Image (cartoon, rainbow, N blue to C red):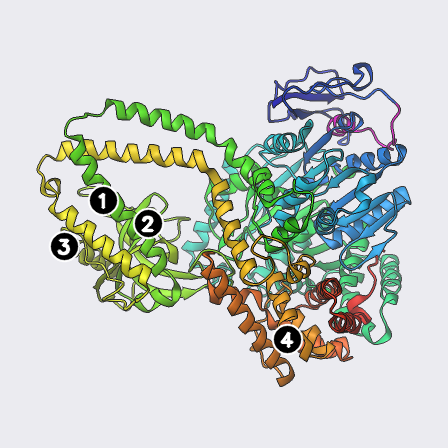
């Protein structure tokens, strides 16, 4: 496979393309011409590269189609546009006319949709069908509306809506496409093109694998169009497609912005804006320094404006909106934006509650004329006609009208769908001037504004408060600047604490993140593959062809180079007395490996937590970094602990020896190397449970207040003193005698370690004096060990890891009766094949063990809601008896399934599995809704946002339909009717009101 590249250029004046072969950065020169700010001469280039299979030769007529490396199109266009195409659009169209797959990677507002529309127009011209997939149902609905206006013959298939399924162009979610591919749908025989919108979703932890599987299963005759935000490894992705489908795949990449951006910073509590990055992407260090000065001044005056609460947000900021608090800062900014005519503006917050509070604090502002107010009311009244009388009076609807009339709106995933869509429509019509939104608004449809404001630079990502990445910043700031309307877009970043210059520079000017595979094996996929008769699609085939494996194998040549370097180093090391040292070193390595194996068994929370009392000495190792011995201060359970590594749900606050200068407020402490004479500092560092590599028998007392440095330094001295008292190493907890573990596997490991330690202590080199010789030998043994490790890695790669996992998962399926001893899918497995919304193993267990049979359809709807992922409630759950018993049965079944997976050697934490799989937060709400309660009544029963409740109800309906299909497939007529009745009981009122886009 080869990759060829060139840069295509087009310019208003004839200038030579200044982009070298495959050069990554497009040129952006700008010279102002006369007074008119609209006429700017911009040289834009896009990068074009193509991955071609080895031995491939093109049969295209070069006079019409150009060459693979330089595609041009001189024929009749399948579609004409009202505007001149940008270079990247021209090149993309030429690739499509060559009938070859293409990845278009460009900013959100660059105009990728024009390329997708061309592919659809070509399919219509050639009497073929085309599929357009998008990651979210809401996006699919919007796309359906947009494409219907352009092409008429368009259908829609999402989990909850099907319109014109026989249309030539089908818009669908990616999950639906994967389902069609698994079932070998007839539709695919007529499809020539599949468009994957927002392909960068592939790195989504939960759902990314759906894209990967869909791409692997697509028949090679179908060509693909991938639309993506900018990503740094677009070529690698194209090489994977080329390798997988044995066809050329083009990359057209541009990070050219038709409307340049200016980035300003507003220091919270300060006044004025500081331009930090100008429209030529130059970072203005002078302004940044001035900005930093405002913070030091605030400190000098003991200003508490930016005082931060313990959760990392400025405390009490929004609610009061008093002088100097964050609310009034936002008020100041919005007012200034309106005075300078920089509207419309999108204000991004990373919390839905904050969005609403900011909007409500704008009570004194009004941006719409009387005429606009009347138009807003007219659109509003028409929009809510799709609701019944009582739902139109919901506070969530009534409160919105006065806000919208003043040109202010809120947009986040917790809003009622009708309000969210109404806001989008009003925003596109220019009737909303200030939109308070969460980052989901930056996905998908092109709804630009003149100005974008970030209310914070840090967000909570489920694990920690971190600065937003450059990819996220590019996505959101890309909403600023409307093509053809604004000379430049404006981004304003609110900062409430000092920030490193490089952190800000990387955020605003950083390169987009690479697309990384999140491939995993699900039981749904394994069962579907086993039940497919063709034989070619096995789980092994999917693993081998995954992007994950491709990325892994691509890294192998680098590993090969490292092996060669290490082999050269070994040749130079002295060879005398080697056998003794090799033997000595092997004993040490064997002990280390057995200890590692033993620790992974001990590290289960149920075993280890009891011994992690404050004062316990623990050894911390992170990858190749040894932090040495630290002291336990506290253990915290993470609230959002999902599945994942064993014990990953706990954080151990540990006092560790850190390098001088890595203080608590820097982004990341570094270990202090044990160099003679170097004095570090003890700091409390949050450590994930699996990073503990040893537990000592020793405990020391900790002073009650660890804030003063001297208190922490006294502990450092105590730990160092223990080190000199135990030169052989600190005594460790014995799992059998000290921890009382009776597991035979662990007892055996402890015995093996003790045997090896005896050998080690009696070895002549253990007390040997020849330090240099030992060091030289040890280095040699280490290098040899590293060579072996790398060679093994090259040999069995990730494939082996996935093969082992596949074997273990197949054992689970055998134990649960989904497949027989020969791997043939049984009745239970046939049911599980049809369920991809909830946990397929658990729900089929309930179908087959009779849990569902004893319930009426209202209880079934409530119990099924536990399978739907969604927002967690913070309230205590008190359930009525008719729900508490089924919930208990569900939790018992979940525990049993988790135990079976654990027995089959899958890395699973039983409690975490039960907690993350069974989500009883909406049981009461769904039960009462199913029994006919009104929406205003059920919404009082929970603290979860209305929009989230509706989204969960729609997913629940989809899930119940899958269960109905599963019951039908295994001939359970009674169950089939119950699932149908449960689904029917939900489908009414505002929960299932039609989308305004349909």
Residue of label 3: 726
Q: Residue at x 67, y 32 (%)?
A: 245
Residue 240 in the image: state x and y as whole percent: 61, 33
Task: Indicate the quadrant where residue 97 lies.
Answer: top right
Alpha carbon distance from label 2 to label 4: 46 Å
Alpha carbon distance from label 2 to label 3: 20 Å
Tell me which label, 2 or 3, sits earlier in the chain.
2
Quadrant in which the N terminus is drawn? top right
Q: Secondary structure at mark 4?
A: loop
Viewer-side residue, 410 vs 209: 209
Residue 16 in the image: state x and y as whole percent: 69, 15
Q: Residue at x 50, y 53 (%)?
A: 808
Specify start and end residues of the magenta stretch as a single range.
76-93
**Can residue 950 be found in the magenta stretch?**
no
Q: Secondary structure at mark 1?
A: helix
In the picture, the disc for residue 588 is 1
Residue 996 in the image: state x and y as whole percent: 84, 58
* Eye-nearest disc, 2 or 4: 4
Q: Residue at x 48, y 67 (%)?
A: 911
Q: Where 852 falls versus 420 (above or below)?
A: below
- Identify the main secondary structure in magenta: loop
| Contact, mark 2 vs mark 4 (Cβ under 8 Å) | no
Q: Where 343 falls versus 739 (above or below)?
A: above
* Mark 4 residue crowding within 10 angstroms, few (<14) / some (14–19) / many (20+): some
Alpha carbon distance from label 3 to label 4: 59 Å
How many marks can you see?
4
Q: Where 446 falls versus 693 (above or below)?
A: above
**Can residue 91 be found in the magenta stretch?**
yes
Residue of label 4: 851
Residue of label 2: 621
Task: Indicate the quadrant where residue 736 lies.
Answer: bottom left
* Eye-nearest disc, 3 or 1: 1
């Amino acid at each position: 496979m080869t990759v060829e590249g060139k840069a295509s250029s087009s310019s208003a004046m004839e200038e030579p393309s200044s982009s070298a072969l495959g050069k990554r950065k497009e040129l952006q020169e700008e010279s102002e011409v006369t007074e008119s700010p609209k006429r700017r001469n911009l040289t834009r280039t896009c990068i074009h590269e193509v991955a071609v299979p080895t031995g491939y030769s093109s049969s295209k007529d070069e006079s019409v189609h150009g060459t693979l490396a330089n595609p041009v199109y001189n024929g009749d266009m399948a579609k004409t546009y009202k505007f001149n195409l940008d270079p990247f659009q021209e090149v993309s169209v030429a690739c499509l006319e060559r009938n070859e797959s293409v990845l278009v990677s460009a900013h959100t507002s660059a105009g990728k949709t024009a390329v997708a529309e061309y592919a659809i127009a070509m399919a219509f011209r050639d009497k073929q069908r085309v599929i357009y997939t998008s990651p979210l149902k809401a996006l699919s609905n919007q796309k359906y509306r947009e494409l219907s206006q352009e092409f008429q013959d368009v259908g829609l298939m999402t989990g909850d809506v099907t319109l014109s399924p026989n249309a030539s162009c089908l818009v669908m979610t990616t999950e639906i496409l994967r389902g069609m591919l698994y079932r070998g749908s007839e539709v695919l025989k007529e499809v020539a093109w599949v468009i994957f919108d927002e392909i960068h979703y592939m790195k989504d932890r939960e759902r990314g694998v759906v894209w990967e599987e869909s791409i692997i299963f697509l028949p090679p005759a179908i060509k693909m169009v991938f639309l993506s935000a900018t990503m740094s490894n677009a070529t690698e992705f194209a090489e994977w497609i080329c390798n997988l489908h044995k066809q050329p795949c083009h990359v057209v990449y541009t990070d050219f912005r038709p409307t340049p951006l200016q980035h300003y910073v507003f220091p919270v509590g300060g006044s004025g804006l500081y331009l930090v990055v100008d429209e030529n992407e130059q970072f203005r260090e002078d302004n940044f320094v001035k900005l930093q000065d405002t913070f030091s001044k605030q400190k000098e005056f003991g200003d508490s404006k930016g005082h931060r609460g313990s959760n990392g947000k400025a405390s009490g900021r929004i609610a009061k909106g008093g002088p100097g608090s964050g609310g009034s800062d936002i008020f100041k900014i919005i007012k200034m934006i309106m005075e300078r005519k920089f509207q419309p503006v999108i204000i991004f917050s990373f919390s839905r509650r904050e969005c609403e509070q900011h909007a409500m604090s704008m009570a004194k502002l009004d941006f719409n004329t009387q005429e606009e107010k009347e138009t807003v009311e007219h659109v509003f009244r028409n929009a809510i006609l799709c609701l019944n009388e009582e739902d139109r009076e919901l506070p969530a609807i009534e409160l919105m009208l006065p806000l919208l009339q003043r040109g202010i709106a809120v947009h986040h995933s917790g809003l009622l769908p009708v309000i969210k869509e109404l806001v989008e429509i009003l925003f596109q019509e220019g009737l909303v001037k200030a939109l308070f939104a969460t980052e989901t608004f930056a996905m998908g449809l092109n709804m630009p504004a003149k100005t974008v404001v970030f209310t914070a630079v840090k967000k909570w990502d489920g694990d920690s408060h971190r600065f937003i990445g450059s990819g996220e910043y590019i996505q959101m700031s890309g909403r600023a600047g409307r093509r053809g309307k604004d000379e430049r877009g404006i981004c304003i970043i609110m900062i409430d604490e000092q920030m490193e210059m490089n952190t800000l520079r990387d955020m605003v000017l950083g390169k987009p993140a690479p697309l990384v595979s999140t491939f995993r094996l699900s039981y749904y996929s394994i069962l579907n593959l086993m039940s497919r008769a063709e034989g070619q699609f096995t789980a092994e085939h999917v693993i081998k062809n995954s992007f994950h494996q491709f990325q892994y194998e691509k890294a192998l040549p680098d590993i090969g180079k490292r092996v060669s370097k290490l082999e050269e180093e070994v040749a130079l090391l002295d060879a005398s007395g080697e056998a003794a040292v090799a033997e000595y070193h092997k004993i040490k390595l064997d002990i280390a490996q057995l200890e590692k194996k033993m620790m992974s068994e001990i590290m289960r929370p149920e075993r280890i937590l009891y011994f992690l009392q404050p004062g316990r000495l623990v050894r911390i190792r992170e990858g190749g970094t040894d932090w040495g011995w630290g002291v336990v201060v506290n253990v915290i359970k993470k609230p959002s602990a999902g599945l994942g590594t064993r014990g990953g749900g706990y954080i151990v606050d540990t006092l560790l020896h850190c390098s001088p200068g890595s203080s608590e407020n820097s982004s990341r402490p570094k270990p202090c190397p044990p160099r003679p004479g170097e004095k570090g500092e003890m700091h409390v560092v949050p450590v994930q449970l699996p990073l503990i590599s040893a537990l000592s028998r020793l405990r020391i007392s900790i002073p009650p207040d660890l804030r003063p440095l001297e208190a922490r330094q006294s502990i450092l001295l105590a730990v160092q003193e223990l080190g000199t008292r135990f030169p052989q190493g600190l005594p460790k907890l014995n799992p059998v005698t000290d921890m009382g573990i009776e597991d035979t596997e662990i007892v055996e490991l402890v015995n093996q370690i003790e045997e090896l330690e005896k050998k080690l202590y009696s070895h002549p080199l253990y007390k040997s004096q020849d330090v240099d010789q030992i060091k030289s030998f040890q280095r040699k043994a280490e290098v040899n060990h590293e060579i072996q490790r790398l060679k093994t890695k090259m040999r069995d790669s990730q494939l082996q890891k996935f093969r082992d996992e596949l074997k273990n998962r197949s054992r689970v399926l055998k134990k649960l009766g989904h497949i027989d001893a020969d791997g043939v899918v049984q009745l239970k497995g046939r049911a599980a094949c049809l369920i991809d919304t909830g946990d397929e193993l658990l729900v089929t267990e309930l179908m087959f063990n009779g849990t569902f049979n004893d319930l009426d359809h209202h209880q079934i709807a409530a119990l099924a809601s536990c399978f739907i992922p969604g927002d967690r409630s913070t309230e205590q759950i008190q359930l009525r008896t008719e729900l508490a018993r089924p919930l208990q049965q569900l939790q018992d079944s979940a525990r049993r399934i988790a135990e079976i997976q654990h027995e089959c050697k899958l890395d699973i934490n039983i409690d975490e599995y039960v907690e993350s799989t069974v989500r009883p937060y909406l049981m009461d709400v769904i039960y009462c809704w199913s029994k006919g309660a009104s929406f205003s009544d059920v919404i009082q029963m929970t603290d979860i946002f209305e929009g989230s409740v509706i989204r969960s109800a729609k997913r629940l309906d989809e899930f119940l339909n899958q269960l109905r299909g599963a019951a039908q497939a295994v001939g359970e007529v009674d169950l089939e009717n119950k699932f149908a009745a449960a689904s029917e009981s939900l489908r009414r009122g505002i929960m299932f009101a039609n989308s305004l886009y349909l």
